[in-house]
Amino acid sequence: MEGQGAIKIHYFDEDGRAEVSRLVCVWAEKSFEDIRIPFEKWPVTKPAMPLGQVPVLEVDGQKYPQSLAIASYLAREFGLYGRSNLDSLKIDIVAQTVLEFRVKASKHYYEQDAKIKSELATELTAKEAPTYLAYLESQLVKNQSNVMVGDQVTLADLIIYDLFQGALGKFTQPNIAHFPHLQKLVEKISDTEVIKKYAIA
């Protein structure tokens, strides 16, 4: 990647849709500027962002939107996108499966009515999360190597880690004991030195 030292990730000061891209850089031990925008400054920052949204990846002064595209690009650049096109397909499936769940969870995030918000949380935790987690667990078991794709950590595994440890964890963590292979994978990622250092930074 040209201008590798000029990687910037723009997002709010929270996990959300930028966290997987941050994790890719952290896991690959590649330096990046983690620009966390205070919510009160968003109205003046928004016009400078493509599509008026974040996360945004900035490389060599050029800004690029869309969270999944950003994470995929960084994973490709840093060797975390599998060893074949079929590996990449499997990684994309994990990414889009989790994105689908995230979109459903966003209804809870934006809901203002307390009663409806509580009902949505219950549905996400008791119904939606187990459905998605069961599929992801089955794919992990099928791969037979303790990672989601291939035989080494890829973007897919970092997405799984974030699914439990990030913003969606409130819906997935209550279910983790029912999916022991996913639980073991999350623990494996959590126990690495680079992730430990990042978590306490």
Image (spheres, rainbow, N blue to C red):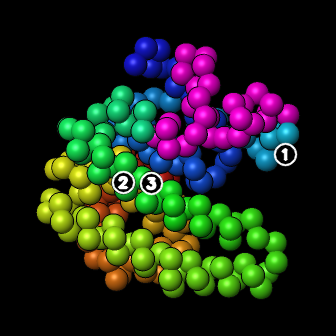
- Whether residue 94 is situated above or below residue 47 in the rendered picture: below
The amino acid on which the numbered mark 3 sits, given as a three-letter code, is Gln
The amino acid on which the numbered mark 1 sits, given as a three-letter code, is Glu
**Side (left or right) of 10 relative to 27:** right
Magenta range? 44-71
Q: Are marks 2 and 3 in contact (CB under 8 Å)?
A: yes
Residue linked to disc 2 = 93
Q: Quadrant of residue 106?
A: bottom right
- Residue that appears at 78% across and 35% down: 46
Q: Residues within 10 Å of mark 1 (few under 14, many from 20)?
A: few
Determine which of the numbered discs, if any, sits on residue 96 in the image: 3
Q: CA distance from mark 3 to mark 1?
A: 31 Å
- Residue that appears at 61% across and 17% down: 61
Give the mark toward the camera: 3 or 1: 3
Is residue 69 among the parts visible in the rendering? yes
Determine which of the numbered discs, if any, sits on residue 40 in the image: 1
